[in-house]
Amino acid sequence: MRIRLGRRRIFLILGLLLLFIGLLSGSFVRSKNKNSPPYVVEEKTLRKVVYASGYVRPKDYVLVKAEVSGYVKELRVKEGDKVSPGQILALLDAKPLEASLKEAEYRLDLIKSKLNPDSEYLKTLEEQAKIAKTNLEQAERNLERRQKLWEDGLISKEQYEEAKRIYENAKSEYVKSIAIYQDTIKTLSLESQILQSNIRKIKEELNKYVIRSPIEGVVLSKFINVGDYVNHLSQDNRLFSLGGKELEIVLSVDEEFLSLIKEGNKVFLTLEAFPKEPFEGRIFQIIREVDPNKRTFEVKV
């Protein structure tokens, strides 16, 4: 029964509504001129619009930091300057390292001069080895004569033993002089390699005191001045901010619209610099991590 009554009431209400609409449309038609054109019904898409605010920044944004600590010695760029990859932006003072490099290079030059075949140092060692060899050859000839004389009974055994002792000493001196010559060359060569390795490391470290641009772009901000001390371990380690030629717009959107935002959506923009000139863009990236404090997420256009 309740269901039937409910249906009758619904039918009754619908009937009254239809009658009311009919009366309205009838009276509306009667009020119009018979010669006026008929009204046309059109289908239109309902658009949902999301409003957001944001800021413009270079698409390739780079914050240049220091790898080492030191005082700012020289600045070679200012805000607004165009830079290319590898271009020097600033120099940090590296006097202790420069002194170490100078000393290492001086020692290397000395070693190279000693290792030169025409150097006086090697010639002296070679001369000592030649003298030792000459003495050995003389002692060897003397020993051979004394041995023959001793075998013939013309000299005593003591005289023969003395010649033999002189020969052994001469042989030892010759071997020693050759070893000194070879060890000296080996030691100098090893020291040269170590110094060359140290020089490469010092130069690599010195290169960190030269601040270069990693990208092609524009200097957006300069955070240092000549004489400032830069601490590469500090949280405030900022030297320059650089940006590429292409720009992007970062918008902060309320989290309630996260399901509505899609990559490729069209965006209409108005900028403070051009308040009367609208721009059009498209969303190319959505950062879906919501800021818990602001309850917003970022969209890049």
Image: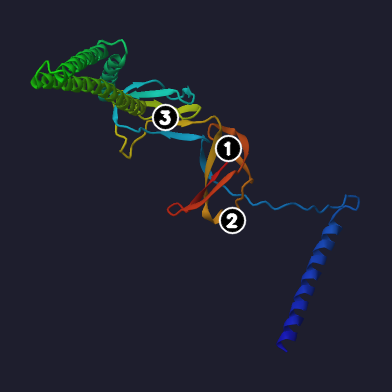
Q: Is mark 1 on a helix, strand or loop?
A: strand
Task: Residue 291: give its label.
Answer: none
Q: Residue at x 55, y 37 (%)?
A: 248
Residue 99 in view of the camera: no
Asked if residue 201 can be seen in this view, the reply is: yes
Identify residue type, mark 3.
Ser
Q: Distance between the residues labelled 3 and 2?
A: 36 Å
The Cα–Cα distance between marks 3 and 1, rounded to whole angstroms, is 25 Å
Residue closest to the far right: 35
Judging depth in this view, the residue of 41 and 274 nearest the camera is 274
Tell me the mark number nearer the camera, choosing from 2 and 1: 2
Q: Is residue 275 left or right of residue 41?
A: left
Instruction: Tell me where residue 253 appears, x and y as whole percent.
Output: 53, 49
Most foreground residue, 73 or 110: 110
Where disc 3 sits, the SS reads strand
Name the residue rendered at 75%, 85% in the picture. 4
Seen from the viewer's position, the closer of residues 108 and 249 is: 108
Residue at 58 percent of width and 37 percent of height: 270
Residue wearing tag 3 = 221
Image spot of residue 158 (x, y percent): 8, 21
Left or right: residue 153 versus residue 81 is left
- Quarter residue 230 falls in: top left
Farthest residue, direction front: 152
Q: Look at the picture and state if 90 lies above or below 261.
A: above
Residue 259, label in figure: 2
- Asked if disc 3 and disc 2 are in contact, CB closer than 8 Å, the reply is no
Find disc 1 in the rendering and name its residue: 270
Q: Give the residue at x 72% y 82%.
A: 6
Q: Which of marks 3 and 1 is nearer the N terminus?
A: 3
The mark closer to the camera, 3 or 1, is 3
Disc 2 marks a residue whose amino acid type is Ser
Q: Quadrant of the C terminus?
A: top right
